[in-house]
Image (cartoon, grey):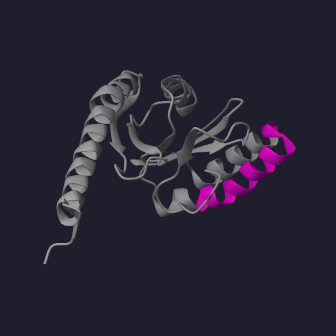
Amino acid sequence: MPVHFRGFRFQVALLVFLVVSALGLGVKYLHQQTKVLDPLIEQIQGVPGVVDVRSEQSILDRTSRVLLTLQVEQDSRLAVLFPRVYQTLLAQGGTYGVRVEDAPNSALLEVFQRVQIAVEEAIVTGEFTALETRVKQLADEAGLAWELGLDREFIYLSLVQGESTLRRIVSRGVSEGRVRVYTDGGVTSWPNG
């Protein structure tokens, strides 16, 4: 039996509320996708070295970050490519997470676990020349090609062995905030990377 309160039907009101809420969320998602994310993805795909960009976002959580997954060319330099992506995201506004796809093998992951200590130490002490020496030593011992880059925001590390690549962008903790970098593969639990 429907509940009435002076001619007001609660079931009808609830149904109208749910329909209007669903339509509102759908319109918000469509606007975000077509007016914000699609142009942003197009800009990032224009950065030399970026092959593909995928985005993920929850339509129900207003405060969630938009996660952008970047696929980059194997021979691209992270220290050149990523600052352009980072500045594009900062100029856009909003909060973002960025993940750079890589395909490490066990040898790359093993070397990275040893390099990780030197990276954290360099962030704390500011002795980045010691980091370079340590990365060179470990990579040369394992027969890996390597690249290390640095700016005021991040440390960029690439290790390569044949077709396998490990890419890490490590925040120096200078301006944690609107853009966060996440890692993939093997050592995903490293909170700083």
Q: Which residue lies furthest to the front in this view?
A: 6
- Judged left or right of residue 60, residue 144 is right
The segment highlighted magenta reads 110-129
Seen in the picture, residue 58 relative to 149 is either above or below; the reply is below
- Dominant SS of magenta comes to helix
Q: Is residue 111 magenta?
A: yes
Give the residue displayed 72% in from the left and 30% down from the top: 152
User: Where does the N terminus fall, quadrant-wise?
Assistant: bottom left
- Judged left or right of residue 79, residue 101 is left
Seen in the picture, residue 69 relative to 152 is either above or below; the reply is below
Give the residue displayed 69% in from the left and 37% down from the top: 175
Is residue 10 at all visible to an observer of this figure? yes
- Judged left or right of residue 143, residue 102 is left
151 or 157, which is in the foreground? 151
179 or 82, which is in the foreground? 179
Seen in the picture, residue 169 relative to 36 is either above or below; the reply is below
- Judged left or right of residue 46, residue 191 is right
Is residue 158 at all visible to an observer of this figure? no
Give the residue displayed 20% in from the left and 52% down from the top: 19
Q: Does the magenta stretch include residue 87?
A: no
**Residue 53 rendering spot, x and y as whole percentages:** 34, 36
